[in-house]
Amino acid sequence: MPQSSNTQATAMGQAIVIRFEGRAIAAALDDTPDARAFAALLPLTLTLEDYAATEKIADLPSKLPARDAATGHTPSVGDIAYYAPWGNLAIFHKPFRHSPGLVKLGRLTEEGDVARLAKPGSVRVEIAKAP
């Protein structure tokens, strides 16, 4: 894929990387206003916490516009989403029911990588635009 201004575009949108414990997980954001607003916050260092044995969540430093929050989203394994009512990022390691207020931002590009985040307990991550 062509590179411009040190970011790599994907068919989905902005390529990102999630780093933790010496590992890197590739992901791609959707080409939507909400995903672009999230990308504008990067790089971020966050502590992801377990939630409902289904996802890892962390508060973001500022709220996103959440233009698609009214329609909600039914998350799949590997989805990266924003839960507008709480203002938090969510990375799903199990599928979940349709949730109003949940906005899909993108997804992990290697589904097997989600198991790395599914371990119990909190994990400190750095999320950045891919080089």
Image (cartoon, rainbow, N blue to C red):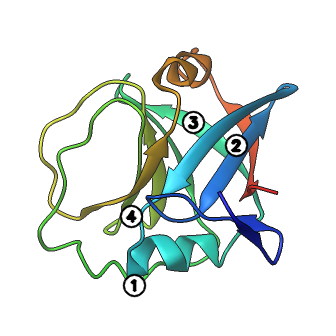
Which residue is the site of mark 2?
18
Q: Nearer the viewer, residue 107 or 93?
A: 107
Asked which secondary structure carries label 3, the reply is strand
Q: CA distance from mark 3 to mark 4?
A: 14 Å
Q: Residues within 10 Å of mark 4 (few under 14, many from 20)?
A: few
Question: Are circles 4 and 2 on residues that touch, CB within 8 Å?
Answer: no
Q: Which numbered mark, 2 or 1, is in the foreground of this view?
A: 2
**Vertical comparison of 73 with 52: above or below:** below
Q: Quadrant of residue 79?
A: top left
Q: Could you tell me residue 88's position as x and y percent?
A: 47, 59
Q: Residues within 10 Å of mark 2 (few under 14, many from 20)?
A: some
Q: What amino acid is found at the position of numbered circle 3 in the picture?
A: Glu
Which residue is the site of mark 3?
49
Asked which secondary structure carries label 4, the reply is loop
Asked which secondary structure carries label 2, the reply is strand
Q: CA distance from mark 4 to mark 2?
A: 22 Å
Q: Earlier in the sequence, mark 2 or mark 1?
A: 2
Question: Are circles 2 and 3 on residues that touch, CB within 8 Å?
Answer: no
Q: Could you tell me residue 62's position as x and y percent?
A: 58, 78
Q: Is residue 73 left or right of residue 6?
A: left
Tell me which residue sits at (13%, 38%) in the image.
97
Which residue is the site of mark 1?
65
Q: Which numbered mark, 4 or 2, is in the foreground of this view?
A: 2
Outermost residue toward the front in this view: 2
Asked which secondary structure carries label 1, the reply is loop
